[in-house]
Image (cartoon, rainbow, N blue to C red):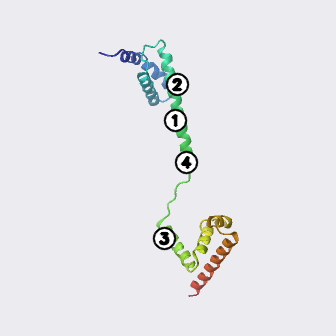
């Protein structure tokens, strides 16, 4: 009723499971990992195309177990490096509701101060002051000359000062 392949694997498992588990336990120093590797080793035997009786079963099992152990160590190494890189990433900071309101008010104030300026002037100023772009980078981004960008930023800056003074005086 049982196939010869099943009988061979069953006998191999019965004869060598405890020995392989002990060997792997000494190798990986973790009983759960050793048990997983032992089972994975026998799964490999079971799914291998040749299920004929082995002349050196322990050597074959050790070869499979060593390869699986190396795979486990590599996976753990990759995981450790990933976690280390993740730990170096800054924690995301969520702004408080008060900070969000202040930012919204500041943006609205800047928009009000820039009111009346042409869009290219506003755009150049905002790229410089809010995004931190340099004048040459703005010129390239907007397709303008450097002199034009400098004039736009200066014009917007002076307009903000004048608007602020007018607001303070009122």
> Badge 1, how many Cα within 10 Å: few under 14, some, many 20+?
few
Asked which secondary structure carries label 2, the reply is: helix
> Badge 2, how many Cα within 10 Å: few under 14, some, many 20+?
some
Q: Label 3 vs label 1: CA separation?
A: 46 Å
Quick check: marks 4 and 2 in contact, CB under 8 Å? no
Residue drawn at x 59%, y 68% is 130
Which residue is identified by label 1?
Answer: 75
Residue lying at the far left in this picture: please name it: 1
Residue 139, picture quadrant? bottom right
The disc, 4 or 3, on the residue closer to the chain's N-terminal end is 4
Q: Label 4 vs label 3: CA separation?
A: 31 Å
Residue lying at the far front in this picture: please name it: 143
Q: Label 1 vs label 2: CA separation?
A: 14 Å
Q: Label 3 vs label 2: CA separation?
A: 60 Å
Residue drawn at x 55%, y 79% is 115
The disc, 4 or 2, on the residue closer to the chain's N-terminal end is 2
> Badge 3, how many Cα within 10 Å: few under 14, some, many 20+?
few
Residue 167, picture quadrant? bottom right
The disc, 4 or 1, on the residue closer to the chain's N-terminal end is 1
Residue 48, above or below 112: above
Which residue is identified by label 2?
Answer: 66
Which residue is identified by label 4?
Answer: 87
Q: Is residue 23 left or right of residue 136?
A: left
């Amino acid at each position: 009723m049982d196939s010869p392949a099943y009988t061979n694997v069953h006998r191999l498992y019965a004869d060598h499971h405890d020995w392989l588990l002990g060997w792997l336990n000494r190798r990986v120093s973790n009983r759960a990992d050793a048990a997983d590797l032992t089972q994975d080793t026998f799964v490999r035997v079971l799914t291998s195309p040749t299920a004929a009786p082995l002349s050196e079963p322990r050597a074959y099992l050790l070869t499979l177990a060593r390869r699986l152990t190396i795979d486990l160590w590599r996976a753990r190494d990759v995981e450790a490096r990933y976690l280390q890189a993740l730990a170096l990433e800054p924690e995301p900071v969520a702004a408080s509701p008060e900070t969000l309101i202040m930012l919204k008010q500041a943006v609205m104030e800047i928009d009000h101060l820039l009111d009346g300026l042409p869009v290219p002037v506003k755009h150049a100023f905002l790229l410089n002051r809010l995004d931190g772009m340099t004048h040459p980078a703005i010129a390239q981004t907007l397709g303008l000359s450097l002199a034009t960008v400098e004039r736009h930023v200066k014009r917007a800056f002076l307009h903000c000062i004048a608007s602020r003074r007018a607001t303070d005086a009122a």
